[in-house]
Every structure is written in C-alpha cells, then in structure tokens.
Amino acid sequence: MRSCMAVIAALSALAGCAGPVRTHFGAQSGAAESLALQTIAVSPSDQTDARWPALAAAIGREGFRVDASSPYQLEFAFGTRSARTAILGEQNAVLAPAKRQRLLQSCADRDYRLVVTVVDNRNGDLVRRGWAQESHCHGTSAEALPALANQAVAMLARPVAAGSDLRRARD
C-alpha cells in the first residue's frame, strides 16, 4: 500500500511540471506571395519589444536578413489566454480549440500564441503569415517564446497550412 501511495504522490508531483509540449503551427500565404522573400523590414519600435531577441534569432536561423529598405514589412503579435477558451473565426470555424485539463494536472493551462505577418509595403497586400501556439500549466511565456518564434518564422520560409510537433519542456 505504501508503494502505491508513493507512486501516486510522485505522479501527482510530476503531472503538470515537465514532459512533452505540443506546438501547433501553420501558415497562410497571400495573393502577393513572393518567392524572393529574403529581406524584411522591422519597425524600430518592434525591435525594442522584449520579445524581439527571440524573433531576431529565429529570423537569422531561417536565413532572412533585416533590412530597413526591404519592401516586405514584418509585424508580430504575442497573446496569452486561458486554454479553456477556444478562438473562433468566420462562420464559427475553430482557429484554436479549447484544451481540456489532463488527469492529475495541478493547474489550469494558459495558451501562448505568436503570429508573425509579412506584408508588401508597396501595396499593403499580405505576403505570408505564420503562427505557433502552445499550452502550458507551469511554463511561462518567456520559456515558450523561443520555440514559438522558431516555428512561426519557419512558417514564413516553409509554409504548411497546419501541423504540430512535440518537444520536451516545462509544461
């Protein structure tokens, strides 16, 4: 009986702390899609955002260069919400489903979502949008951001409509 209680206690302690984290990601290409998307402009105010270093690292890793004279403008947005709520789009299409709490999970999940958009400055048309999202119980937005930035920026270089990947991290 004691060994059973010890196993239950150990599982309870570990249930929401560490393990596999699923990163959901996807991309949308616009009518102005460019095969020559190699340089991007980023506003100076975005470069002072606390999230910029993670994005800058991902941009460099994907082979993009930041150049103020580029006709392609990069914009990004980072958000967090309760994972129990879904995000619905037009005609109630589910953009991000609600997540159920796992067995023995010790806290409520938070969703972290990063959206990176590139528009053509010459006409305002969407070139490409990449996004990545994760749910975490104990993991912070700062811990999730590098992985989200890598996936969202990868969607600018190698877009797929939707996908997911597992990584080991603090949940």
Image: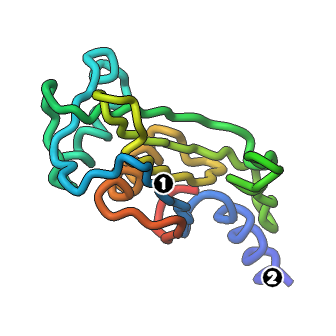
- Is 53 rendered above or below residue 26? above
Left or right, residue 69 beside residue 100:
left
Residue at image point 44% right, 49% down = 30
How many other residues sit within 10 Å of disc 1, few (<14), some (14-19) or many (≥20)? some
Residue 52 placement (x, y as % from top left): 31, 31
Residue 128 placement (x, y as % from top left): 39, 48
Image quadrant holding the N terminus, namely bottom right
What numbered label is drawn on residue 92?
none
- Is 92 rendered above or below residue 67? below
Q: Nearer the viewer, residue 96 or 119?
A: 119
Left or right, residue 120 beside residue 104:
left
Instruction: Inspect the image, locate mark 2, and give the three-letter code of the amino acid beneath it.
Output: Cys
Residue at image point 24% right, 38% down = 56
Q: Quadrant of residue 151?
A: bottom left
Residue at image point 37% right, 45% down = 127
Image quadrant holding the C terminus, namely bottom right
Secondary-structure class at tag 1: strand
Q: Nearer the viewer, residue 73 or 111?
A: 73
Q: Check disc 1 and report the residue beneath it.
A: 28
Residue at image point 39% right, 30% down = 124
Q: Check disc 2 and report the residue beneath it.
A: 4
Secondary-structure class at tag 2: helix
**Residue 81 visible in the snapshot:** yes
Residue 139 placement (x, y as % from top left): 55, 47
Dot in front, 1 or 2: 1
Residue 129 placement (x, y as % from top left): 44, 47
Q: Quadrant of residue 157?
A: bottom left
Instruction: Inspect the image, locate mark 1, and give the three-letter code of the amino acid beneath it.
Output: Gln
In primary-sequence order, the first of circles 1 and 2 is 2
Furthest toward the top, the residue is 45
Furthest toward the right, the residue is 1
